[in-house]
Amino acid sequence: MRAVRFHRHGGPDVLQLDEVDVPEPGAGQVLIEAEAIGANAIDTVLRRGGSAWDRPLPGTLTGEVVGRIAALGPDTPPGVAVGQRVAALAEDAFAEYAAVDAAFLAPIPDSAAWGTGADSANLAEATMLPMTGPLAFRLLETANLPAGGTVLIHSAAGTVGHLAVQLARGYDLKTIIGTASSPARLDFIRSLGAEAVNLTDPDWPDQVRAIAPEGVDAVLDSVGGAVFDQGLELVKPLGTMLTYGAISTELPTIPAAALFGFKTVTGVSMMGWRGARPDTARADIAEVTRRWQTGDLRPVVHATHPLADVTKLHEALDARTAHGRLVAIP
């Protein structure tokens, strides 16, 4: 099968299509024949190298895969069958086939139940079901947002962020604030119903304070570094700082004194949540799927690219110009 690999670290040009063996699904796994693959920004960090998360070469790209189950490994859960269309998180996602954990599959509803048929656009939207959508949902649930509160969502035009903005509208909040780094992305955030702040402006924290003079009840941060530190200063007493990544590659360090104002810092990852509360993690997938079916949550697919054009997809990720998700079609 064709699969994306990088044999050295660098820019998008290091990505290439290799011919590799189709993986055999192991215990508790299924093999998916991919129809759509959702890209994640963290893979640009892994591709460039030099971060705390570097992996051995040749490298693979992670992502969320939508497709039909082609084979079952031993000990798969009841109700999982060959031919079923599902979405799943995969470590080696950018390939024609992917072996994935059968315990956290997101079944793709019958197209007759939700309208427009299983065309490529719907399959591209469905890539958010196993990880990015549930992550956005779990971040907001963990934030313990009060009625009439305020949430600050960094990277609000991105894959997770734009879903978090939409989901935040379902809470009884006074204000949703989103940050981004270009005029087009700021307009996109406003179109989703959030106040928009340009993160490239040195005075961006003051802009947040102008919107929320008393501070914010929660910050959703995947940037890290100085942005994390500045965001923690904006959290009001009894508020929560949620960190779920560090696209800057600068992992946050938190002095204890920064928490003495009754502030809480919580780290969130889907793999950690699946390990700690597997049944609730599956319920999160089901809830996100339900909201997608009803139209309450609408993933925005900025563009689709053939798998062979993965370099173009990563060029767009590096440029940070996309609104929503970028998807590869094998």
Image (tube, grey):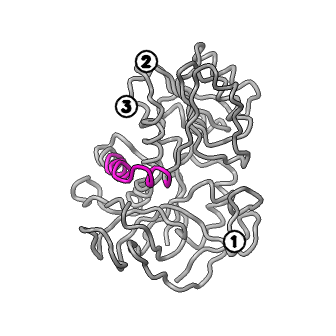
- Whether 19 is drawn above or below 171: the answer is below
Identify the mark at residue 148; answer none if there is no mark. 2
Residue 187 in sight here: no
Alpha carbons under labels 3 and 2: distance apart:
12 Å
Q: Is residue 86 above or below residue 236?
A: below
Across and down, in percent, residue 14 comes to 73, 70
Which numbered tag is attached to residue 170?
3
Tag 1: Cα neighbours inside 10 Å, few (<14), some, or many (≥20)?
A: few
In which quarter of the view is residue 241 placed? Answer: top right
Q: Position of residue 21 (x, y in %)?
A: 53, 86
| Residue type, label 1 | Pro
The residue depicted at 73 percent of the width and 68 percent of the height is 13
Mark 3–mark 2 CB contact (< 8 Å): no
Tell me if 38 is positioned left or right of 316 in this view.
left
Disc 1 target residue? 56
Magenta residue span: 271-288
